[in-house]
Every structure is written in C-alpha cells, then in structure tokens.
Amino acid sequence: MREFKNKVAVITGAGNGFGAEFAKEAARKGMKLVLGDIDADLKRTADTVKEMGAEVETLVMDVTKYEDVENLSKLTIDKFGSVDLLINNAGVVVSGPAWEVPLRDWDWIFGTNVYGLIHGVKAFVPIMLKQDTPCHIVNVASVAGLLTTPSMAAYHTTKHAAVAFTESVNYSLQAMNSKIKMSVFCPGFVQTDLDNCDRHRPERFAIDPKDPYYESESYKAGLERAHFVIKTGMPIHSIAMSVFTAIEEEQFYILTHPQYLPVIGLRVKNILDGKNPDYSIFNK
Ligand SMILES: NC(=O)c1ccc[n+]([C@@H]2O[C@H](COP(=O)([O-])OP(=O)(O)OC[C@H]3O[C@@H](n4cnc5c(N)ncnc54)[C@H](O)[C@@H]3O)[C@@H](O)[C@H]2O)c1
C-alpha cells in the first residue's frame, strides 16, 4: 500500500499506546479513521486526530467478541464505504507460571491477543477481497512471538500464535494473487500502558477477588516485572513511523529491537542443530 491520503484505516486498541500512535500517524498521512477500543478513553485519541484534521469514527468495542469486530466493519463501510488498512493492535499481557495462572486469564489473553486477530481477519478480509483494491493488514504480535523466556507462557503462546496466524493467512492471500498485503509487528519493550492492562479486562474476564492467585507472590512478581520492563522500554515516538514505512515497503516482518536478533537466531539454531533449550542463557 503506497497511497495513504483519503484512504480508510481501522485500528483496534486505539485508546492508548501503539494504537493511539498509529492513529496519529495515519491522520498525519491524511487517512480517514475508524478507531475501536474497550476503553472510553478512546475519545482522547479521537479528539487529537480530529484536531489534526482527520475524519474519524469511534466505537467502544471488545475484540474478544466477534459481533463487536463485525460492528466495527459495518461502521467502517456505512461511514466511509471502504477499508484500506486494518491494524489489529489491541492486546494484553499475562505473566506467571503456566500452572498457576487462572484459566480465566488464559481465556482473556487468548480472547484478546489471538481471537482479536481472528475476528479482525474474519470481519474485514471478505470486504477487502470484494473491493479488490490494494489493502494492508498489520497484526501486532511481539518479539515474544519469535523467542521464549520463563514465566511468560501465556504471552509467548498468544504471540507465537499471532505470528503463525499472520504467516499462514498471508500465504493464502498470496496463493490467490490477492491485493491484500500483510505484516506482523514484533517489537520488544516500548513505553506504553501495557503493564496496567488489568484495567481493560472485559466483565467476563474480571479478576475474581476470591481467587488467592491475585494475592500470590507469582502474580505480584509478574506485575512488578511488567512495570519495570515496560517503563524502561524504548520511547514510543518512532514506532508508528517504522510501522507505516514497513507498510509502504510491503515488509512482512517488522522488528524494531535488533538486540533480540541473536536470541531469535539461537532458538532457530538450537532447533536445526537438535539442541535443547538451556535456561542458563538467562543468567548471562
Ligand atoms: N508495549 C510493549 O512493550 C509491547 C511490546 C510488544 C508488543 N506489544 C503489543 O502491542 C499491542 C498494543 O499494546 P500497548 O503496548 O500499546 O498497550 P496499551 O495498554 O498502552 O494499549 C492497548 C490498548 O488496547 C485496548 N484493549 C485491551 N483489550 C481490549 C479489548 N478486549 N478490546 C478492545 N480494545 C482493547 C486497551 O484499552 C488499550 O487502549 C498489544 O498487542 C501488545 O501485546 C506491546
């Protein structure tokens, strides 16, 4: 996708963090915007892009529910008649040992980080195929989808799924000679509000106050680690520009943190060499 002016961008999780930055970058490029988020703070992003001169529609919605994502697609077509760029960005993090994390939290993170992408592709790809115009879909995964670390099984599992899902859908679109291009965004830590994502839990995934897990050392340590790595992550200002350049250049894998490349390489090398993963790399 090389032309952005007057084209229509749909962004989920646009209330905060990456989503808000993508919305501002799209507005800078003269795009019309449809923004979705579970948090009514979405209005803040909408007000900012309006001030920048963008036409914008918003929907408070939950990517874990297919009907909500379908409503986002209906709003897009009703208001603007087409869709050119979809950024499936909404996401959450859950940390802690796999066997301790409550099943409800597994459902929440799969609902958001995996089903959120599935819902986006199911609702928007048929519209894009029918349009038969140059379109682009960015699925926001993470470098956590290309490597693994301890006590992050839930996040890694969903982000590896996000990478695999995007690769497979992209192959299918290529096989059809479709005009839809795809990218998977795999950043390392960036300063956003991701570490406070418990505040975006849909009602049915709310923290159960009777569950002792949320008083446990594992849960508290996970939160502390998340606060530390997110607040000491890369500043956010260059992220949206990197992603839009990649869209323009039809780059599939978008990586912004080269310091992780040796770890990704080591994982692949271990697989190819038949070597076992070795925890001691985390003590170096
Ligand atoms: N910040 C990082 O270091 C980092 C690194 C790699 C990948 N990511 C990924 O980037 C994406 C965006 O996260 P962020 O860091 O900007 O976090 P953020 O918490 O600042 O923003 C996420 C936004 O998604 C929204 N959201 C959450 N659940 C939702 C739902 N069910 N339906 C609709 N909207 C929902 C939130 O309200 C919020 O506005 C996520 O997929 C995250 O996994 C972030």
Image: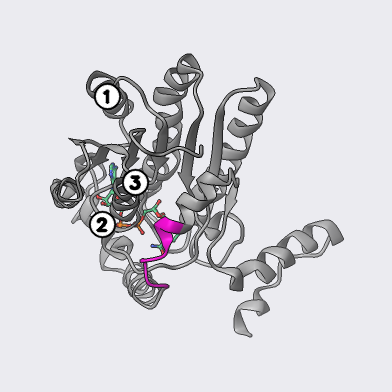
Does 235 appear in magenta? Answer: yes
Residue 215 seen in render: yes
Q: Is residue 35 left or right of residue 241?
A: left
Assign the C terminus to one quadrant of the image. bottom right
Q: Which residue lies furthest to the top in this view?
A: 130
The quadrant in which residue 265 appears is bottom right
Q: Does the residue labelled 1 lie within 8 Å of ligand 1?
A: no
The dot on residue 80 is 1
The residue pinned by badge 2 equals: 198
Q: Residue furthest bottom?
A: 284
Q: Is mark 1 on a helix, strand or loop?
A: helix
Residue 105 image position (x, y, % from top left): 35, 50
Q: Residues within 10 Å of mark 1 (few under 14, many from 20)?
A: some
The dot on residue 26 is 3
Q: What residue type is labelled 1?
A: Phe
Q: Which of marks 2 and 1 is nearer the N terminus?
A: 1
